[in-house]
Image (cartoon, helix red, strand yellow):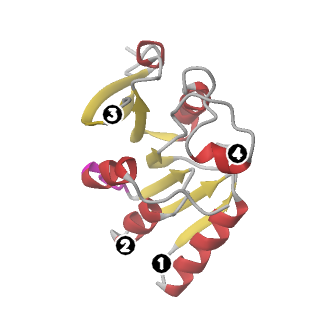
Amino acid sequence: MSPYPVSEDTLLILDHLKCGKKVLDMGTGNGVIAIECAKRGSQVTAVDIDPKAVMELKKIAEEENLKIEAFVSNLFENVNGKFDTIIFNPPYLPGNAVELEDLQWAGGGEYGDEIILRFLTQAKEYLKEDGEIYIILSSFNRIERIKNLPYQFELLATKKFSFHEIYLYRLKIKDKA
């Protein structure tokens, strides 16, 4: 499997991303976001379900002398600690992944948001109190259901395609007051 290519969703994130001191790049894929945050001076942890993507990122990080800790993890399965910034460009299109490679774009179930919902349910446990999550959602997703989770949602950008729209959101944990 070759890592997810740099495409419009990755570029949308890069155009609006503020990397915190300690960053988690969830589902790193091609590693471009992890690499950019490391170049900006962040302490980066990058995880992916695909061992080949992780190996490729480790190779690039070593060649470019970047401090990136990369390892295989299915969402937060092998992740420890809390982060200032968590970035996730999830598989947001509807469909069921048959092969590992399908998870790069689909595999989110009927509405493309099953992995997103699992991620957001767990993410607050790994986010520092004043931390931020950057996430891509799609017009196929059940946005109102996702917005019922305990986060403040700020829409940063949108991109229209012929068959759907994608949205870049910045999330913070809702105040408990």
Tell me which corner region of the image, top left, top right, bottom left or bottom right, holds residue 123. top right
**Residue 59 screen position, x and y as percent:** 60, 79
**Magenta highlight on residue 18:** yes
Q: Which tag, 1 or 4, sits closer to the chain's start?
A: 1
Look at label 1 and name its amino acid. Leu
Which of the two discs, 3 and 2, labels the residue nearer the N terminus?
2
Which one is nearer the viewer's eye here, 87 or 125?
A: 87
Quickly name the residue at label 2.
Answer: 39
What is the spatial separation of the Cα atoms under label 3 and label 4, in whole angstroms? Answer: 31 Å
Q: Which residue is nearer to you in this view: 19 or 146? A: 146
Residue at the spot of label 1: 66
Residue that mark 4 sits on? 74
Q: Amino acid at mark 4?
A: Asn
- Is residue 47 among the parts visible in the rendering? yes
Image position of 123 (left or right of 164): right
Mark 3 crowdedness (10 Å alpha carbons): few <14, some 14-19, many ≥20: few
Task: Give the secondary structure at mark 4.
Answer: loop
Identity of the amino acid at label 3? Ser
Type of amino acid at the residue the image marks with label 2: Lys
Dot 4: within a 10 Å radius of its alpha carbon, few (fewer than 14), some, or many (20 or more) residues?
some
Q: Specify the segment rendered in magenta.
A: 16-20
Kindly identify which numbered label has been placed on residue 162. Answer: 3
Q: Secondary structure at mark 2?
A: helix
Q: Which quadrant holds the C terminus?
A: top left
Mark in the foreground, 3 or 2: 3
Q: CA distance from mark 3 to mark 2?
A: 34 Å
Do the residues under discs 1 and 2 have CB atoms within 8 angstroms? Answer: yes
What's the magenta bit mostly, secondary-structure-wise?
loop
Residue 22: image location, x then y, percent: 45, 57
Q: Earlier in the sequence, mark 3 or mark 4?
A: 4
Query: In terms of image quadrants, where is residue 56?
Result: bottom right
